[in-house]
Amino acid sequence: MPDSTPSSVANALGPVLAVLAGSVLALQSRLNGALGTRLGDPVAAAFAAVVVGVTAVTAVSVLSATNRHGLRRLVRQLREGRVSWWFLLAGLIGALFVFAQTRTADTLGVSVLLLAVMGQSLGGLAVDRWGIGPGGVRRVTGLRVLGTAMVVAAVLLAVSPRLASAAGASRRSCCCRSWPER
């Protein structure tokens, strides 16, 4: 009989939730980019997205006794120095991602944001190797490197037409050399 403890359920649902979250990032990028274009201000659009996200997280936190307790524990542990302030940099990183997608998605296209997936894959190997996070150091195995290399290759393949056209445009606009056209 399968184990139905909360941790085994979380372990089973984790990959499904990760794929779902990754899937809707493309939609988030498109919506943020379109809002940034419509407003003519990507910072205002990023602000709106973050405010809605904070509102949703606040609502979930207020409605759940477990989450309210967790927030109190966070504040207490920050005050006592048992949780380092630099863990809160994750919020800045999230804001940077939202701003980047808001700034680029509508003008460059959501597919170019696949480069962020490549960055996440490469960064993930480094974070695991250095042991940053609650899981500690994770071995960088050959299969994990192969999987990351496949992600990098897939992303580069997906954006190669745009990269090629951008490279061609930069060669044509260079005033110091004469580049042959292909």
Image (spheres, rainbow, N blue to C red):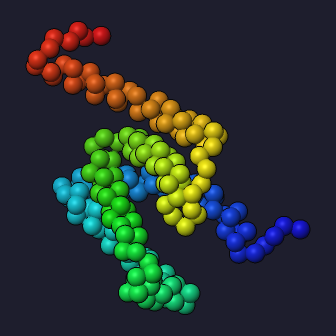
Relative horizontal placement of residue 65, taking residue 94 as reference (left or right): right
User: With respect to residue 177, does 8 lie above or below?
Assistant: below
Image coordinates for residue 143, horizontal then vertical, percent: 65, 40
Count of numbered circles in the view? 0
- For the residue pair 173 and 26, the one nearer the viewer reads as 173
Residue 124 visible in the shown view: no
Residue 176: which quarter of the image? Answer: top left
- Residue placed farthest to the right in the image? 1
- For the residue pair 149 and 15, the one nearer the viewer reads as 149
Q: Quadrant of the C terminus?
A: top left
Query: Residue at coordinates 14% horizontally, 14% vertically from top-left?
Result: 177
Query: Residue at coordinates 33% horizontally, 65% vertically from top-left?
Result: 92
Q: Quadrant of the N terminus?
A: bottom right
Image coordinates for residue 70, horizontal then vertical, percent: 51, 85
Image coordinates for residue 105, horizontal then vertical, percent: 33, 47
User: With respect to residue 41, does 142 lie above or below?
Assistant: above
Query: Residue at coordinates 10% horizontally, 19% vertically from top-left?
Result: 175
Relative horizontal placement of residue 130, taking residue 106 as reference (left or right): right
User: With respect to residue 10, does 126 lie above or below?
Assistant: above
User: With respect to residue 108, does 176 lie above or below?
Assistant: above
- Residue placed farthest to the left in the image? 175
Residue 27: which quarter of the image? Answer: bottom left
- For the residue pair 35 and 141, the one nearer the viewer reads as 141
Query: Residue at coordinates 35% horizontally, 56% vertically from top-left?
Result: 97
Residue 69 visible in the shown view: yes
Image coordinates for residue 98, horizontal then vertical, percent: 34, 58
